Image (cartoon, rainbow, N blue to C red):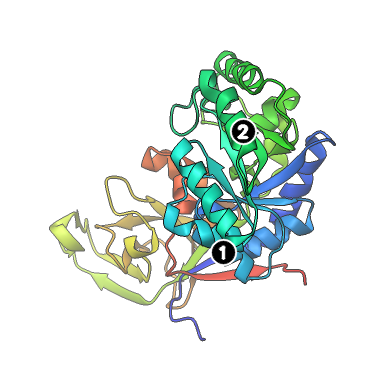
Amino acid sequence: MTPTSLTRVVVDLEAIRHNVRLLRAHVSSRAQLMAVVKANAYGHGAVPVARAALQAGATWCGVASVAEGIALRAAGIQAPILVMSYTPLEWVEEAIQHRLSLTVFERAVVREISRRAWQLRCPARVHVEIDTGMHRLGVLPHEAQPFLAEVAALEGVVLEGVFTHLSRADADTEYTEAQIQTFCSAIGQVPVRYCHICNSAGVLGYPHAHLDLVRPGITLYGLSPYASSTPEHPLVRALRPALSLTTSIVSLKWLPDGAWVGYGKRHQCNGHRRIAVIPVGYGDGFRYMPNHFGEVLVRGRRTPIVGAVCMDHTMLDVTDLPEVSIGDEVVLIGTQGNECITADEVARRWGTINYEVVTALTARPHRVYVNAQP
C-alpha cells in the first residue's frame, strides 16, 4: 500500500543492533538479554526491532500484553517472550497456546492459570514478580517464599522465573542497592531458571545484579535512561539513537503584519511573514499543549513553530529562509546539516522524559526501516 502521509518515522535497524551489541558486551556472560519491545517498541515498531535485537544477541523479548506477544509470534518470532504485566483471565488460553511466559503475583490468578493449562494439556510458564520498593505490581517480600512454593507445586505450571523492577536505578544508589538486597533475601533458595532485576539503568550501573537475565528498554533505542541532572554512564555516549521523525512542507504563503496564525489566535505576525505548513500534528504525536516541540529543522536551520499545533498540520515561520520551497524535508527529531534535535531536547521542552516523546508517536506516521537484514 502506498503511504498516504508525508510524515515518516525512520528507524535505523543497524543502530538497534549496534546498541544491543554494546549492551551484550557490557552484561555478564552468565546473563541473557531481553529486548523490551512493549508499546510498539517505544514507538519504533515491535516486529522489526525485535528481529534486529535478536540478530544482535538478545535471546528474549519483553512485552506488556498478550496481544503484543501474539503479534510477535504471528510475525514468526520464536524466541521466548515474557508478558511483563497483568494478564486478564480471558487471555490465558491464548497466551499458553502461543508459548508466552506470564507474570504472576496473585494467588487466584495463578491457580486459574494452572487449571486452564491442565485443560489444554499444555504447560504455562510463569515469572513471579516481587515488589521490592516500586510498589506497583508484585508479591510483597515477606510473602514471596510461600507464594513461590505454591506456584512451583501447581499442576501444569512451570515456575520459569522470578523478578523485580528497579524504581530509581538512574539516580538513587542506596535505594537501588536496598531493592537488590531485598530481592535476593526474598527469593531465598527457590530453584528457578531465571532471576532478573535490571532495567536499562540497572544494566549500566549495577553489574553485580545482572543475574540470569537483564531487561534493557530505552537503551536499545539509543536513548539515555538517566534524567538530565544525573551523571550518565560512559556507555550512553556510545549508543546510537535509532529514530528520526521527518515530514515535508506542503504550503507556503506571505501574510501581512498583524495576521493571526492558527486556532485560538495564539500567534500574530509581527511584520510581513512567510508561513510554511507541514502535515503533522497532535494526531501523529506531535504535541499540542502545554509545550510543543518549539522548533524544527528546515534547510539545516532551526525554525520556529508558530500558532497552535493542529491535529493534522503545524505552521512554521520561514521568513528568514527565502530559498525554502514546497516539498522541502523538515526534520522534527534527528539531524539535518549541522543541526540536531534529539528526543531528550524535546523531552526537556515538554517537561517529561524521552520515553514519552518516542512512545507518543502514533501509528499514523509511515514507518520506514533502513539497514534491515534477512
Residue 231: image quadrant is top right
Residue at disc 1, secondary structure:
helix
Residue at disc 2, secondary structure:
strand
Q: Earlier in the sequence, mark 1 or mark 2?
A: 1
Q: Is residue 365 above or below residue 225?
A: below
Tell me if residue 46 can be seen: no
Whole-Å distance between the Cαs marked 1 and 2? 22 Å
Which residue is label 1 attached to? 70
Tell me if residue 117 can be seen: yes
Crowd tier of the residue under label 2, counting other residues whose Cα lies within 10 Å: few below 14, some 14–19, many 20 or above: many
Crowd tier of the residue under label 1, counting other residues whose Cα lies within 10 Å: few below 14, some 14–19, many 20 or above: many
Residue 255: image quadrant is bottom left
Amino acid on which the number 2 mark rests in the picture: Phe
Residue contact at pointers 1 and 2, CB within 8 angstroms? no
Amino acid on which the number 1 mark rests in the picture: Ile
Residue lying at the far right in this picture: please name it: 29
Residue found 53% across the figure and 51% down from its top: 115
Tell which of 266 and 256 is nearer to you.
Answer: 266
Q: Position of residue 4 (x, y in %)?
A: 43, 81
Residue found 43% across the figure and 32% down from its top: 136
Tell which of 209 and 293 is nearer to you.
Answer: 209
Which mark, residue 163? 2
Q: Position of residue 114 (x, y in %)?
A: 55, 48
Tell which of 152 and 54 is nearer to you.
Answer: 152
